[in-house]
Image: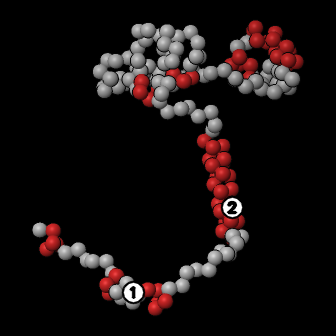
Amino acid sequence: MFAPVYQSLQPAMRSQSIWRLGATASSTFARRPTLLRSYATPVEYLPKEADPQLNGYPELPRTSLQTRSPYGWWDIQGRRNYGETLHAEHDQLDMFGPDISKVPPRTAARQLGIASASLLAFAWIVYTFKPESPAVPRQYPYSGLVKELGGLQENKALEESSDEEE
């Protein structure tokens, strides 16, 4: 698809710069579509301020050791070489830190929602269609053994008073 356009622009690229190629309307390429830049544009680099809490310790890139290849390391389990400078946040970025998820957050949230909805639907179906109990509830005489247990006043919980604790 792009090969014919690239081949036809090849002679012009030798004589003109890529900047003028897209901007020149009076050139021989006026009938062809304007080229768009597909490479990085120069940006003024501003160095980051040094972290005062590191006090001169090297600022290493924040990448987890879980992303490294499992082969070719002095410490195979930790995926690091002997004498390699540790990151300031090594406890979070080592092999035993929080796992790196391969599932995007939106997909994970959708899957969690589907699982939750399925569980709630199952619970609703069980609650709606549960059969009646085959046993008869137990019946106690005298208003549910109120008289045998000493009456309603005797069965209430005792109120705590501060006099007994002292």
Mark toward the start of the polypeptide (1 vs 2): 2
What is the x, y in percent for residue 159?
Answer: 25, 77
Element type at mark 2: helix
Q: Quadrant of residue 149?
A: bottom left
Q: Quadrant of residue 71?
A: top right
- Circle 2 is placed at which residue position? 121
Looking at the picture, does residue 133 appear above or below residue 101? Answer: below
Residue 70 is at least partly visible in this image: yes
Element type at mark 1: loop
Question: Which residue is found at the position 70% from the left and 23% from the top?
Answer: 38
What is the x, y in percent for residue 68?
Answer: 56, 19
Query: Considering depth in this image, is 103 or 23 the residue closer to the camera?
Result: 103
Q: Is residue 143 left or right of residue 131?
A: left
Count how many numbered circles sit on residues in the image.
2
Query: Considering depth in this image, is 1 or 63 the residue closer to the camera?
Result: 63
What is the x, y in percent for residue 15?
Answer: 75, 9
Q: Quadrant of residue 92?
A: top left
